[in-house]
Amino acid sequence: MENKVTLIATATMGLESLVGREVKALGYENVNVENGKVEFTAPLDAIPRANLWIRTADRIKVKAASFKAVTFEELFEQTKSVPWEKFLPENAEFPVTGRSVKSKLYSVPDCQSIVKKAIVERLKQSYHTDWFQETGALFKIEVAIHKDTAVLSIDTSGDGLHKRGYRPLHNKAPLKETLAAAMVQLTNWHPDRPFRDPFCGSGTIPIEAALIGQNIAPGFNREFVSEAWPWIPVQLWDRAREEAEDKANYDQPLDIQGSDIDHKMVELAEENAMEAGLYGAVSFKQMQVTDFKAQKDYGCLVSNPPYGERLGDKEAVETLYKQLGSTLRPLDSWSIYILTSNEKFESLFGKKATKKRKLYNGNIKTDYYQYWGKRPPRNR
């Protein structure tokens, strides 16, 4: 395998620039930020490092090829010309998924089976065999066709990067860890300032803030499918994990607190924080939002309150937003960041946002309302 690979970090709409920033922060150049993805060329050790460190991307893929294809024959021949033997060992398991947008080749099942067939033909020549058992490591291949350009990629992550390993499977919380991390990154918070989330649910936003505050790699607690790939030396994974361990600042004191009206959620948040290895770094308590008080100045409040999407919840949520506005209004030194799909938020909250940004929470189109507090005096 060559020393350089082209990688694609896939991103939820609206988060591409943050993913690009994270890629550059890892020291990689030639970074292209596009719709839904960030592409960059980097040494082989970028696969472990990007998977371990990037907080806001959905997954990291190796780009195997890109070409124009308007006929099935072109798709077959171009796919077959890719040196798949560099990527796939003889016993590789390689399922093919696909998608097609605004392209002549619109039948996704056909595209998938043609790509699979072409790869098999190529590997038959390389390995001089007619039969592939597919009992080895997993290489998930995707054919994505957009405006007649096909991109073939291999997923290096396995489970999506939002699965950090601290949130148990039974917890179907609506906010993904990647979006929670993005919400924290879009604020002016510093680890020496207080951080609050009054609708913390299962604790995702405070936990992501604590990981950022102590510079803990978000993928430190989990495994990745490409760890089993023979062409990525084990030493690269070991080195990347050592780097993550060295860079973590577990001694950074943090004042991060989440609260929620539901005591079951508070218990779940505490369990998740323990699972993330953040015992003592973040705390949770049962409280309604109208009881929120700030003990310190220049804090940061980040939250994903209920949206009132379901019929019957609407009025309760509108009342809640009004209460939130009157509770937080006195805190003029605090910066407040609220994610909601409710378009009347500003009028209910009683104040126009300094800035708002469109983000997607799953399939729900939301706005991230940002209210900037007074700046702390210089000598602080």
Image (cartoon, rainbow, N blue to C red):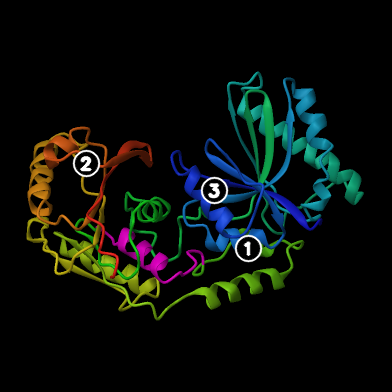
Task: Indicate the position of residue 29 as horizontal and vertical percent values.
Answer: 65, 51
In the rendered structure, are the residues bearing label 1 and label 3 in contact, judged by CB atoms less than 8 Å apart? no
Q: Which residue lies at the image location 67% right of the left edge and 23% below the top edge?
A: 148
Q: Which residue lies at the image location 67% right of the left edge and 43% below the top edge?
A: 153
Q: Nearer the viewer, residue 200 or 134?
A: 200
Question: Mark number for residue 20?
Answer: 3
Q: Secondary structure at mark 2?
A: loop
Residue topped by disc 1: 48
Task: Indicate the position of residue 213 as horizontal and vertical percent values.
Answer: 39, 68
Mark 1 / mark 2, whichever is N-terminal: 1
Q: Nearer the viewer, mark 1 or mark 3?
A: 3
Q: Confirm whether the magenta stretch covers residue 203.
A: yes
Q: Is residue 267 visible?
A: yes
Q: CA distance from mark 1 to mark 3?
A: 17 Å
Task: Indicate the position of residue 115 as horizontal and vertical percent values.
Answer: 73, 35
Q: Is 336 left, or right, of 324 in this rendering? A: right
Question: Mark number for residue 307?
Answer: 2
Question: Mark number for residue 86?
Answer: none
The residues colored magenta run 201-219
Q: In the image, what residue type sits under mark 2?
A: Tyr
Report the number of numbered marks.
Answer: 3
Q: Quadrant of the N terminus?
A: bottom right
Q: Is residue 36 above or below residue 296?
A: above
Q: Which residue lies at the image location 18% right of the left edge and 37% below the top edge?
A: 346
